[in-house]
Amino acid sequence: MTERTHGGSDESVRAVAPGRVVLIGDHTDYVGGLVLPMAIDLVTEVEGRRTGRNVSLRSEQFDEPVRIDLPVVEPQAVRPEWGRYVAGVAAEFRPLVGLVGTVRSEVPPGGGLSSSAALELAVALALGGGGDPLELARRCQRAEQVATGVPCGIMDQLCSAAGVEGHALVIDCATEEATPIPLPDDLAVWVVDSGEPRRLTESAYAARRTEAEAAADLLGPLRDAPLDRIEELDDDVLRRRARHVRSECERVRRFAAAMIDGDLSTAGELVTASHRSLRDDAEVSTATLDALVDELVARPGVLGARLTGAGFGGTVVAIARPGADLSDAGTGGRRVRASAGAHLR
């Protein structure tokens, strides 16, 4: 049985958790691959009092507040829908004391910047959840899986929990080890809204995971599968899913080395190659995302661009020289910086 969290009655609390952007390495985490995200300076904050026997939160992003009685029995049945993430966390951490407060978030929902993980971690900390970043991430991952039915990997929660200011993270999803990688001072990271919202619960995300897992059943760990064995697969879908994971993990390794060496040109080429693989082999892009990537890579100062997160809409990430201005791209671009991980204030 999951241990219940404790917190003082009528205790004021303020918890903050960042969103994240994946610089390279998507649709690899759920088969033990390599990813390279960074926590960003767009955060979700939960502020309130630990009191009572229910969790009652209102959000500045959503009209309808959430009120959940403790203990939580069926997180997937909670309304409104954003409250399922709150309910999943409450079911996982089983707090002895409730929470009354407000959620404020700079992380756009449906934008592919992990608004759900940021909310989960902020709520977990506000409810008195503790532990090291990995344990906190594991439990919030379980909370999301239970609450939504989406078989998400651990990348989003671990990046938000373990973020390091000025660094991205290389996460080995087989060992769950996160290694900070310093980002060059002359690297600018932009997130650009495509204007096409995505909802993982209504996308082919679960199908992509099932397909990659089926390929892994045939080949073993896809991150190191021999390329000739991948190309010998009879099933074209499984062959492309395996090829994406194998090539994407190699791109993560090379991108991390390029960051350490300050080789921004190579890093940009790898980012754009990653998008092509996500488009052609993982098949998680859309015409809107493809057009936005093409537009961005043609702009002066842009080194590379790719969809970020699960795809099927959402956000494009671009890495650029510091002088580039992408604020007018898509339906709005914003420069982001590498942030520290989730914490209490």
Image: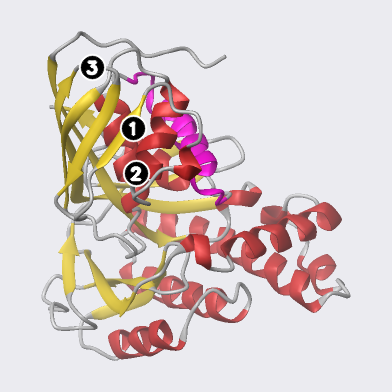
Identify the element where label 1 is drawn: strand
* Residue 279 against residue 65 in the figure, above or below: below
Q: What amino acid type should be assigned to the residue bearing mark 1?
A: Ile
> Which residue is under mark 2?
83
Q: Few, some or many C-alpha atoms within 10 Å of disc 3 (few <14, some 14-19, many ≥20)?
A: some
Q: Is residue 76 visible?
A: yes
**Range of magenta residues:** 129-150
Mark number, residue 122: none
Mark number, residue 52: 3
Mark 2 vs 3, N-terminal side: 3
**Left-right relation of 23 to 249:** left
Q: What amino acid type should be assigned to the residue bearing mark 2?
A: Gly
Residue 266 picture location, percent across and down: 40, 71
* Quadrant in the picture for residue 268: bottom left
Q: Foreground: 63 or 1? A: 63
Residue 293 picture location, percent across and down: 36, 83
Residue 134 picture location, percent across and down: 44, 29
Q: Are marks 2 and 1 in contact (CB under 8 Å)?
A: yes
Residue name at image x 43 percent, y 55 percent? 257
Q: Foreground: 59 or 343? A: 59
Residue 215 picture location, percent across and down: 78, 60
> Which residue is under mark 1?
68
What's the CA distance linking mark 1 and mark 3? 11 Å
